[in-house]
Image (spheres, coloured by chain):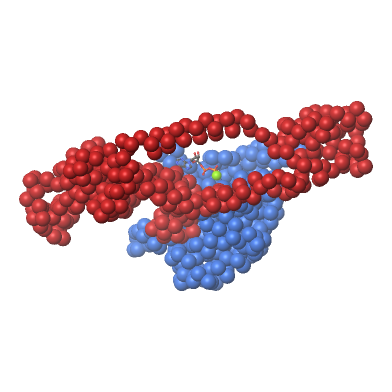
Amino acid sequence: MSTVASSTPTAPAARDAETTRGLVEITKVRKSFGVTEVLKGITLTVEPGGVAVIVGPSGSGKSTLLRTINHLEKVDAGFIAIDGTLVGYEVRGRRLHELPEKEILKQRTEIGMVFQNFNLFPHLTALENVTEAPVVAPRAGKPRSSRAEARARGLELLDRVGLKDRAGAYPRQLSGGQQQRVAIARALALDPKILLFDEPTSALDPELVNEVLDVIRGLAKSGTTLIIVTHEMGFARDVADTVVFMDQGQIVEQGTPQEIFTNPREERTRSFFSKVIEPAFNI
Amino acid sequence: MSSTATPVAQSAPEPASAGIESAPDTAPAGTAGPAGPAVDGGTAGAETASAETAGSAGRKAATDYEDYRLVPARHPWRWVGTAVVALGVAGIAWSLATNPRWEWGVVAQWFTAQSIVNGLLETLKLTAISGALGFILGFILALMRLSASPLLVSVSWTFSWIFRSTPLLVQMLLWYNLGYLYEKISLGLPFTDVRFFEAQTTTLISQFAAAVLGLTLNQAAYSAEIIRGGILSVDQGQLEAATALGIPAWRRSTRIVLPQAMRAILPTAFNEVIGLVKGTSIVYVLAYSELFYTVQVIYNRTQQVLPLLLVATLWYVVITSVLSVFQYYIERHYSKGAVRTLPLTPLQKARKFLSTHAPATGKTTQERGTR
Ligand SMILES: Nc1ncnc2c1ncn2[C@@H]1O[C@H](COP(=O)(O)OP(=O)(O)O)[C@@H](O)[C@H]1O
Ligand SMILES: [Mg+2]
């Protein structure tokens, strides 16, 4: 379905919008917090409709990388493009101009994000959580939804994640797994090209993990580009086209699940998996 | 306890439970919980120490207690305490009612007198206007303080610093005497030539204007801190999620952050408003005829000092009580989603109390279980 080219330093060319819904090109991205460099030149391409799973030890910069993709975090160097359009900047002549807030918001509506601790709005019901953004967010090339449209679509999405009957519940009245499924519906409400998942099951009790993973599995087949940070290796093996192993702000290696899990080339990858996977089999 | 232990917990006493007061031979204690049937006071241990499963029917121990009468636990010390407090309250009430020096007749005579009511209305007006303006300005100051601009941050900080560190009385007198310091004043942008209007200071700063100005600015300085604290109490992830969804900045503040901040803001904000109600009495120094000043004028004439102070006090109590009721319901509104189930309103509580404390005749353990 998709391939990964880890070495495309050239600026992404504009492509036909039909075939390139959700192409993510990350090129030589660097990011520091103070003196610590957290991303040390990351280059990664995820094809439209592809599923990339990012794994790696805690603190290796996985979350930071995800956050640069929707410009929650500004990069220090390098660039990120979605379908050939730079995120957060505009090319004018030989200069990159930082986009005004409103334009960045539009870009963000094309990129959904699901957080480790859900971040649902606690004072809004499940349905209100899902319908808030479509009604108020400025969309790229689309009008805002009316309340009625948003509501109909919201119920449809809640149905899709199996929570139609909890539409009126507040987040605190839902289990962790249910909350995360609402968060996924919320991210889908803007009909994004790309969905980012930052450890979507790490805050869940073990028996709730699968209900969330099942929803994500369904999305993997839908043609939306998914970039998923997770520690669920079995799930990664199932769902990924590409597995990316990150350590200390760098991509150590990437490839098909087969290549990375069964035959890692790098010693660092091997030692990481020996810590992460084997204990799971020993139980 | 190891996981292989038999489910029959021999005679291990369950944690004390509701029925403990009843006579020991009826021993309903163990049956209250769902795991009850296995434990049966004195008999079970003697009969069957073997690993009979808890569910096995037919054993005498499993008799259902459905027909038993439930005797609620009694709290004698609670009654003693209540009696002591009630006596104290009665004593105070008695002395208030019977000591002629309180002059309740005078209080009643003045309580709804026209001049008092006018003063009361002025007090309410001052509170409403300077409270509203103070909180609006405070909100703006709080946003400035939280902004990324160092200039806005320091302006906001300095404002709070000045108005919190000077006595309100001094501020009032300063505003009122502004005409002495500056003959003309104009409203405009600071440090620019932009002027919206210009006027003679003494015509502009009436007693009312000085009062509102003093109370508002002072209130704004305090409100700013309260609102800022509320905003800071909202989890950073909320803003992040809203940003990631492309929700515009103003909407993020008003729809996502502020409603959540309200929970932290409201209790302190109501403290402030209640303080302000009584704080307005300070404008008597401007000879502004609000409640307190009116009362003073009257008792200077009639020499009925205490009864008239009592009149003012009672009105302040009334206002505060009304505000407290508002506070309760507004806080309840904003606790939506923050608590799993909304707390009951006093009315609902009263109903529940009446229904559960109805005469206990015929109440059985089964009913109790479903309560
Ligand atoms: N806002 C921030 N300020 C300072 N340091 C940060 C910030 N965000 C992340 N870091 C640091 O960057 C490193 C990578 O963090 P992160 O991307 O969250 O890693 P991961 O998600 O792989 O666990 C960590 O050492 C973390 O402490
Ligand atoms: Mg992380």
Vertical arrangement, residue A185 with respect to residue B164, above or below = below
Q: Is residue B362 left or right of residue B101?
A: right
Where residue B360 sits, quadrant-wise, is: top right
Residue A99 visible, this angle: no
Q: How far across and down, in percent of the image, does residue B182 sit?
A: 8, 48
Q: Residue at x 7, y 46 (%)?
A: B180
**Chain A image colour:** blue
Q: Taking the image as four quarters, which one is ligand 2 found in?
A: top right
Q: Nearer the viewer, residue A68 or A187?
A: A187
**Chain B image colour:** red
Q: In this view, does A115 lie to the left or right of A163?
A: left
Q: Is residue B313 left or right of residue B255?
A: left
Q: Residue at x 57, y 44 (%)?
A: A246
Q: In this view, does A5 lie to the left or right of B88?
A: right
Q: How far across and down, in percent of the image, does residue B88 sit?
A: 47, 32
Q: Which of A175 and A145 is in front in this view?
A: A175
